[in-house]
Image: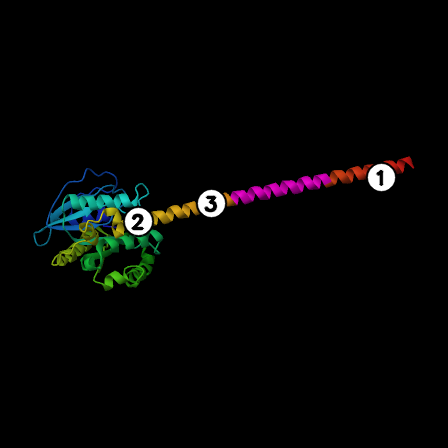
Amino acid sequence: MLGTTGAGKSSFIAAASGLPVPIGHNLGPGKSCTVPIIYLADAITGTVEVRSWSFIGTDNSTITLIDTPGLNDRNRPDTEILTSIVDYIRQRRLKITSVVYLNRITERKLTGSAKLNLRVLQAICGDHFLRNLVLATSMWGAIPTQEIDEAVQRELQINMSPAFWGNMIEKGAEYLRWDETGTVTAAKTAREIITMCERQTREEPKLNILLEMEDNCRLDDTTAYRILTEQVTKRLEREQREMLDEQEEKKRELQRQKAELQAIAAREQDNVRRDRKSTRLNSSHRLY
């Protein structure tokens, strides 16, 4: 449901369902769909609205995957994206039984946006929902053969590090690799993730963000929303500091240039005085 834009969610839905899921900006209007099992996955570049895709699972039950825009989209505020996802769920009274979170294995370090996404993910789910959370890495097909060992080590660090997924896995979240290196492999590993989600439906906790709103809490008062607005506030404050620093730097540069001009003018005046003195001395010698 959450993650940076471009993690491969639309491709994951296509691989898991066998449906012709559009990749990119060619998405039509979302369709209302209320079914027994709903899963959320994070977004890929170009997913601009919330949309659901339904297919039949291994036990003949209807499974719906909800395609959502990813956070960290340059064209939309994160708070607007979160609002669209929550509104989609609440307006259709959907029951979310599992969350699939995709993260690119090609990411070599935990960036600021990745840290923010993890904080928002945990705020949306809550500790009680982590047993219904599946964490998956994607983009294995983009790893060159000579870098596979390094990617595997990175995968271990992601799963073990408390700064990344370690704490969530300790509290019950599951991990699987979505290996999309080939069409068959992509479908197989995507189905394995869906099968894991189906096993999780024995328990049906509610997402923390929905529980918060049941307590007469507005969306902008929920933990997840506050994290995003806090980040916006910090960004604005940082930009304000940077602007002030830039203004101070310009002021110092002007002062430096003024001082240089004054020094040049002073040297010119000294030269003029020396020239005049020299001229007077020469004149007095000629008169003598």
Residue at numbered disc 1: 281
- Could you tell me the amino acid type at mark 3? Leu
Give the SS element for disc 3.
helix
| Labels 1 and 2: the sequence-earlier one | 2
In terms of secondary structure, what is the magenta stretch mainly?
helix
Identify the image quadrant of residue 199: bottom left
Q: Nearer the viewer, residue 258 or 58?
A: 258
* Mark 2 touches mark 3? (CB < 8 Å): no
- Could you tell me the amino acid type at mark 2? Leu
| Labels 2 and 3: the sequence-earlier one | 2
Residue 197 x %, y %:
16, 56
Circle 1 or circle 2, nearest the eye: 2
Q: Residues within 10 Å of mark 3 (few under 14, many from 20)?
A: few
Specify the label residue 228 is tagged with: 2
- Could you tell me the amino acid type at mark 1? Leu
What segment carries the magenta color? 249-269
